[in-house]
Each structure stands twice: as C-alpha cells, then as structure tokens.
Image (cartoon, rainbow, N blue to C red):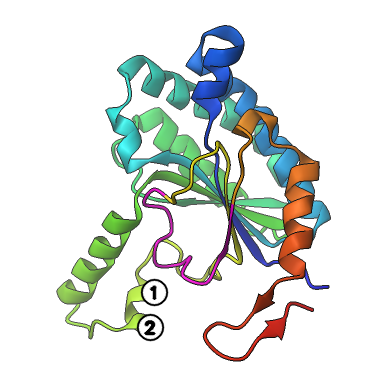
Amino acid sequence: MNPPKHVAIIMDGNGRWGLKKKNSRNYGHKKGLETVERIINASIQNKIMYLTLFVFSTENWKRPIKEINYLISLLNKYLDDEIDNLIKRNIRIKIIGNIKPFPQKLKKKLHKVEKLTKTNNKIQINMALNYGSRQEIIGAIKKLKNKNLNINKKNLEKHLYTCGIPDPDILIRTGNTNRISNFLIWQSIYSEIFFEPKMWPDFSSKDFNRIIRKFQNINRNFGGLSVRNK
C-alpha cells in the first residue's frame, strides 16, 4: 500500500488539555511540542514527504496577549533548540502564511531556518504561521490582478503559499472539534478528513499510524470511478 504524500494537521486541544492538567493553557502548548516531535518521527517512518502543521492562525490574534507572547516565545525556543537537529536529520522547513506581524527576531529565525534547510529532502515540514485560507485565496487573486493574469485554477495555485506542494491526502484535526477552521480550504477539497477526539498532547504515534492504515484502505475516486489506494 502506498503511503500518503502529504498529511496536514490542525493541532487542536492544547489549551484545554493544559487547563485540565495544570490549570494552565500554556502548559498544554508546551506539552504539545512533544507531540509534534512524535508525529514528525512517525511521518518519516511512514515515508510521508510533506507534513503541514497549523501552528498559528490569523484568528489566534484574538487570544489574550500573554498567551500569544508565550506561543511566540515557544516557537523562538524551538527554533533555537532544534535548528541543528533539523539539518542533521535532513528535514526541510517551509513557512506558509503572512509572518509580517511577528516580531523581527522571530522573522529572522524563520527565514534562517528556511534557508539552512532548503536542500534537505527527507521530509518537508510546512509550518502554517499567521495562516488563514480565505486570506491566502484573496491574496492570490489580488496578485493575479496586479500582474494582469487570467484568474483560473492554474494561475491561482501558482500564487498560493502552497505553490509546488501537493494537496494533502489526509487532514487530521485533534481536540474533538469537527471543523477545518479556515485551514487549506482550496487544497483540501479531496483530502480524507479525520476528526480525532483526543487533545493534541495525547495524540500518539499509534493514533497517527492507525489513520495512515485506514487511509490506505479507502477507495478514492476524485469524482470518477473508485480506485483503491494501493
């Protein structure tokens, strides 16, 4: 059975998990990083080429400033701690989204990690930061108009953040919430969607592998005749 090429994940439930365990949303965000590492390893083991993680949405700016600042500090620390390891493990990092509103220090680190991992090819991790799918599509259309290009599927896809990245075969959302929340609207029209009841910090490699196996037994027809994913 062929593995999926691209898995996208809405890592939901960190805050709620943290409140339940330690009465702290930030504790949940910190523990969620451990799950990120587990799922990166599981993705490599499953020979997945692209993993897209919904790290920070355009709507997340509505959260309390203390929580936003903690998320930014957590991302800063992750980049500081893991840059050498990412290079060593042949992992490429690509940022999708509009990072202009982030602090200059973080933006420099994001650009640096993209540059230093550009030629890595074990797996590509797409970090969706200040990402919103509606804004992405509107932005692509504006670019087409500015360039006086025809608004069609081919041209629009060339101007999305995900240009050159295959559409996700699988979209997972943890946290017992059944919606996709402005995430990869254009790209996920034929994704197999799995809504998981577990909060992100509790999501295990075993859970991830179960979804991969289930995907491999789904008949995917893309509007035509059924073709088993083998």
Residue at the (64%, 35%) spot, across then down:
198
The residue that mark 2 highlights is: 154
Q: Position of residue 96 (x, y in %)?
A: 44, 53
Q: As rendered, which of 127 and 183 lies closer to the eye?
A: 183
Residue type for callout 2: Lys
State which quadrant residue 6 falls in: bottom right
Circle 1 crowding by C-alpha within 10 Å: few under 14, some 14–19, many from 20 = some
Q: Count the labels in the image.
A: 2
Residue at the (25%, 61%) spot, across then down:
139
Query: Are the two marked residues, 1 and 2, in contact with CB atoms closer than 8 angstroms?
Result: yes
Q: Position of residue 145 (x, y in %)?
A: 16, 75
Q: Quadrant of the C terminus?
A: bottom right
Q: Is residue 102 visible?
A: yes
Is 188 magenta? The answer is yes
Q: Is residue 20 left or right of residue 122?
A: left
The residue that mark 1 highlights is: 157
Q: Which mark is residue 58?
A: none
Kind of element beneath mark 1: helix
Q: Name the chief secondary structure element in magenta.
A: loop
Q: Is residue 217 left or right of residue 185?
A: right
Residue 2 position (above or below residue 227)? above
Per the rendered image, the range of residues in magenta is 181-194
Residue type for callout 1: Glu
Q: Is residue 167 left or right of residue 6?
A: left
Name of the residue lying farthest toward the bottom = 225
Is 87 magenta? The answer is no
Name of the residue lying farthest toward the top = 23
Q: Position of residue 169 (x, y in %)?
A: 61, 67
Residue 65 position (above or below residue 165)? above
State which quadrant residue 124 falls in: bottom right
Q: Quadrant of the N terminus?
A: bottom right
Q: Is residue 226 left or right of residue 149?
A: right
